[in-house]
Structure formats: structure tokens, C-alpha cells
């Protein structure tokens, strides 16, 4: 399978990823393989259309209509999941939990798994089955990575999350997880350090009884720089509190800014955080002068 | 503490030990030094208490008077805080490494790492691993410890490094004998690769 060069464009790093639309594009619609968005060998095309003829005959009309609606929903869900994953990965603090999206995605992943099993049992063209499998793998990776990143953020800042209204951004299961993490960590610190220290210094949250507030709880650094892009032009936003520096966010341009300045836009989904590979497209990014220090990109 | 011993030096040594280790690697839990720092904290506290008592006997207000005793108390208090910070940093950083380990190896610690931990740390590792398992079970048994890198190909060629024997891979039983080469699904091979029992054959 790996020697097939036409499969190379289907790899994850390719800008236009294979989406669930592929599933609907081939299965049950009788589309010609040339309508696919990337090249493939003519032998595979013949195989595909051959298969498609038999497949469409087996499908009853109502299920085909269902699948068309499914396909429209499926396409946007993968995009949404990818964007949620990118934002979560780029942001220094935890973002709102996309519960409906996660629920839908896991349902669709289960459906895909059943479908692939059915196709393998039917003995369909292994090339098609492996393409579906790749699509499924990538969707699964997105979902797993999204949940994983959130858990790791919770682990790193568990006390802070519990104290502030970031708690409301967690799902019920994540709240349980965070609660247990705090208990585990609390008892760990107690047993090893705090119980052996003199009284008045045994708190996990305060340095000593003399502290006014919980000064031992670290907070995520909202001033980290992030790469971002917006779909539509947003216009001028202030870069610091005094309102001296203003930057214009134009649609489709890549910017590097402090997370704090675009935080409200990310939360409302106007701006999307971007993951940039070291040394690559970063050179096309705009440089910003911030307090007369220009930011240079590697 | 001996005469002329600098306050906080042992705490600093503890932290330096942490910093000098390879990133993500653990050193042996330094029981000795750890207990010495705790003893130092308690000595600070008893001296702090002594000075408080002395000021009270002299009839001075402990909160507002600014004499030599007050500043002595301040130094003891701040040294105590410093030591507390060093101790907490030591434990917390090690706990951090343990947590990232539980993502990689699951519930069972490899013996060479287990030997470096204190009993309390082993207990913490178990707790955290079970917390993670609990979450994954709540999310319909979605295993979050596999699929750590974006998938490139659905199937990869692997060579088995250790004798694993006949295991069920997917719905078939395969004989994973040493040095045998197999063509497996990525998700099936991943746990073995991570434990070092298989290696991926590239090219």
C-alpha cells in the first residue's frame, strides 16, 4: 500500500485533508472517480466506478438521501473538530468544551467503523476500504488529541481551573477528572511535605498563615504569543491597555500576537489559532512592533 | 544548623539536583537531603517561636515592634518559606514527570524507574493512572493513550524485538516471534512500539 504514489497526497500534512465527504462522494452516489480532488491511477478509477455501480444498485433511495444530509453534516463536523483542536492546541488556557461536537464526532466515528467492517466483510476493493480507514484514523486522531490536550491542560493548572470560572468550561467528566487530580495531588503533597512542616505553613494554597490570598496557585500566561488567522476582517484591535498600539485584522492574513489581545475573538470563534511548523510559513507572517520591540520570527 | 551554615543551601541543592537531571528523567529520590531540609524548617520554626516568646516576655507588641528580634523572626519566617518552596518544587516537578509517564506507559511502571521513586510517589502514580482510566471509561472507553502522533499510513511494517508469542491482533491470532516482520495496523502496533518490544521498519 505504501508504494502507491497517488496515496501520497492523502497524507495528513497535505493542506486539503481527506474529509468525510469522501465517504459520501463515493458511496451510494455513483460519482465518477474523476470528481475526486486528487490524482489517482486509472486502474483504481476503473475499480472505483465498477464498485460504485454495484454499490449504488444495492442502496435504497431513502438511505441515499439520508447519506447526502449526513455528508453535509459530516463535512462541517470534521472542519469544526479540526478548528477546535487547533484552537485548543494553540491557546495557553483551556477553552470552552465543545460537547455537541464531540458527541456527534464520536457517533460518526462509530458509524464509520461499522461501515468499514461491513465493507471488509463484503470483500470490497481493499484500496477503497483503506482510504475509508485512513479517513477514520485521522478523525479519531483529531478527537483523541483534542480531549488529550484538554486533560493535559487541566493537569498542569488544576488548582487555578478549580478556583476561577474556567471550571465552567469543563465537561462533567473533565470536572470529575480535575477533582480527582486535585485530591491526588493534595494528598501527595500533604504526605510528603506539608504534614512535616510546622503548623501555619501546611497549606497547599497559601505559603503561610500570614498570606492574604492563595499565593501558591500558578496561573497560565495569557501574554504568550500565538499565531492566528481570521475568516473575516475584524478591523482595529488595541494591542495594550493604553490603546496606543492598534492593529488591523484582515481576513486570511497570518498574525502573531499576544493571546490576551485576541482572547475575546477566539472565544467567540471569530479568530482561529494557527499551528505553524518551525521555520516554514512563519516567514509570511506580519511583524508587529510592540513597545518598540519588533518581533522577529525564526 | 552549624555555626556559619547558610540558610536555604540544602534546599537549593535539592532544586539543583532537579535541574541537573536530563529533561523528563528522574533521579533517585534523595531521602537524606529531603529530610535534612525538613529538619531545617522545624529548627527555623522553633527559633521563630523562641523570639516571639522573648518579645512577649519583654512586653513588646509582636506585630508592630521593629527591633532586632523582629527582624530575626522575619529572617526565620522567610527562610522557612524558601525551604517550603524548594521542597514543593522538588515534589511537584517529580509528580509532573510521573504524570507524563502515566500517559506513556499506562498503569505499570518499568522497574528501573520504580527503583528511583519514594513510596509516596509510587502511590501517587497509581492514583493518577486510575484517575485517567476512570475518565477514559466515562468517555465510552475511548483510549486516549494511543494515537499520539498524526497517522500517516493505516498499516506499518514492524519487526518484533522481543519474544511475545501468539497474541490476538485485531481478529486474528499472530505469532509475534523475535525478529519476525509483520504488517500491522498502526493502532495495533503502537503500544508495542512504545514499550520497545517492536520497531518500525522505514523505507
Image (tube, grey):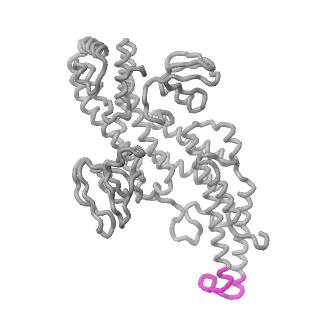
> Which quarter of the picture shows residue B179?
top right
* Viewer-nearest residue: B54 or A28: A28
Q: Residue at x 69, y 60 (%)?
A: B13
Residue A209 sits above or below residue B150 on the image:
below
The number of numbered discs placed on residues in the rendered structure image is 0
Residue furthest to the right in view is B2
Q: Residue at x 59, y 68 (%)?
A: A208
Q: Position of residue A235 (x, y in %)?
A: 22, 57
Q: Residue at x 76, y 73 (%)?
A: B4
Q: Position of residue B200 (x, y in %)?
A: 53, 27
Range shown magenta:
B54-71
Q: Residue at x 55, y 30 (%)?
A: B191
> Which quarter of the picture shows residue B159?
top right
Q: Position of residue A91 (x, y in %)?
A: 40, 51
Residue furthest to the bottom in view is B59
Q: Position of residue B141 (x, y in %)?
A: 47, 33
Q: Is residue A200 left or right of residue A250?
A: right
Q: Is residue A50 magenta?
A: no
> Which quarter of the picture shows residue A2?
top left
Q: Is residue A62 left or right of residue A122?
A: left
* Viewer-nearest residue: B128 or A173: B128
* Viewer-nearest residue: A179 or A139: A139
Residue A100 sits above or below residue A183 on the image:
above
For the N terminus of chain A, the image quarter is top left
Amino acid at each position: 500500500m505504501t508504494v502507491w504514489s497517488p496515496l501520497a497526497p492523502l497524507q495528513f500534512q497535505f493542506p486539503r485533508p481527506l474529509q468525510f465527504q469522501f465517504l459520501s462522494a463515493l458511496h451510494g452516489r455513483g460519482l465518477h472517480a474523476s470528481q475526486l480532488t486528487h490524482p489517482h491511477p486509472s486502474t483504481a478509477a476503473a475499480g472505483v466506478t465498477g464498485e460504485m455501480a454495484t454499490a449504488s444498485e444495492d442502496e435504497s433511495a431513502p438511505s441515499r438521501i439520508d447519506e447526502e444530509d449526513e455528508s453535509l453534516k459530516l463535512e462541517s463536523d470534521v472542519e469544526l473538530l479540526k478548528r477546535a483542536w487547533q484552537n485548543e492546541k494553540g491557546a495557553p488556557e483551556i477553552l470552552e468544551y465543545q460537547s455537541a461536537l464531540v458527541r456527534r464526532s464520536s457517533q460518526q466515528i462509530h458509524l464509520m467503523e461499522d461501515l468499514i467492517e461491513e465493507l471488509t466483510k463484503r470483500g470490497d476493493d481493499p484500496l477503497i476500504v483503506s482510504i475509508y480507514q485512513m479517513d477514520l484514523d485521522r478523525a479519531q486522531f483529531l478527537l483523541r488529541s483534542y480531549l488529550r490536550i484538554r486533560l493535559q491542560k487541566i493537569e498542569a493548572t488544576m488548582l487555578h481551573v478549580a478556583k476561577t470560572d474556567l471550571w465552567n468550561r469543563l465537561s462533567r467528566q473533565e470536572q470529575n477528572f480535575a477533582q480527582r487530580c486535585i485530591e491526588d495531588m493534595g494528598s501527595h503533597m500533604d504526605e510528603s511535605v506539608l504534614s512535616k512542616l510546622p503548623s501555619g505553613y501546611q497549606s497547599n494554597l497559601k505559603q503561610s498563615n500570614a498570606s492574604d490570598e492563595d499565593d501558591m496557585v500558578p496561573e497560565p500566561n495569557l501574554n504568550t504569543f500565538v499565531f492566528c488567522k481570521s475568516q473575516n476582517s475584524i478591523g482595529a484591535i488595541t494591542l495594550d491597555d493604553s490603546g496606543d498600539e492598534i492593529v488591523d485584522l484582515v481576513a486570511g492574513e497570518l498574525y502573531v500576537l499576544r493571546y490576551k489581545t485576541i482572547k475575546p475573538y477566539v472565544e467567540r470563534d471569530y479568530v482561529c489559532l494557527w499551528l505553524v511548523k518551525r521555520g516554514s510559513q512563519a516567514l509570511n507572517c506580519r511583524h508587529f512592533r510592540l513597545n518598540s520591540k519588533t518581533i522577529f520570527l525564526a | 544548623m552549624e555555626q556559619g551554615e547558610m540558610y536555604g543551601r540544602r534546599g537549593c541543592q535539592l532544586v539543583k539536583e532537579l535541574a541537573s537531571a536530563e529533561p523528563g528523567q528522574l533521579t533517585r529520590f534523595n531521602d537524606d537531603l529531603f529530610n535534612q531540609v525538613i529538619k531545617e524548617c522545624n529548627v527555623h520554626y522553633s527559633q521563630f517561636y523562641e523570639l516571639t516568646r522573648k518579645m512577649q516576655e519583654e512586653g513588646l507588641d509582636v506585630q508592630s515592634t521593629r527591633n532586632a528580634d523582629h527582624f530575626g523572626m522575619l529572617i526565620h519566617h522567610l527562610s522557612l518559606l524558601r525551604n517550603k518552596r524548594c521542597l514543593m518544587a522538588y515534589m511537584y516537578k517529580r509528580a509532573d514527570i510521573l504524570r507524563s509517564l502515566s500517559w506513556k506507559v499506562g498503569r505499570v511502571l518499568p522497574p528501573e524507574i520504580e527503583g528511583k521513586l519514594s513510596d509516596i510517589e509510587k502511590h501517587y502514580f497509581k492514583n493518577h493512572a486510575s484517575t485517567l482510566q476512570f475518565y477514559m471509561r466515562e468517555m465510552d472507553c475511548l483510549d486516549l493513550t494511543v494515537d499520539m502522533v498524526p497517522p500517516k499510513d493505516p498499516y506499518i511494517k514492524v519487526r518484533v524485538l522481543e519474544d511475545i508469542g501468539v497474541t490476538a491482533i485485531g481478529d486474528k491470532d499472530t505469532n509475534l516471534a523475535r525478529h519476525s516482520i509483520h504488517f500491522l495496523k498502526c493502532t495495533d502496533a503502537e503500544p508495542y512500539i512504545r514499550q520497545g518490544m517492536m520497531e518500525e521498519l522505514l523505507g
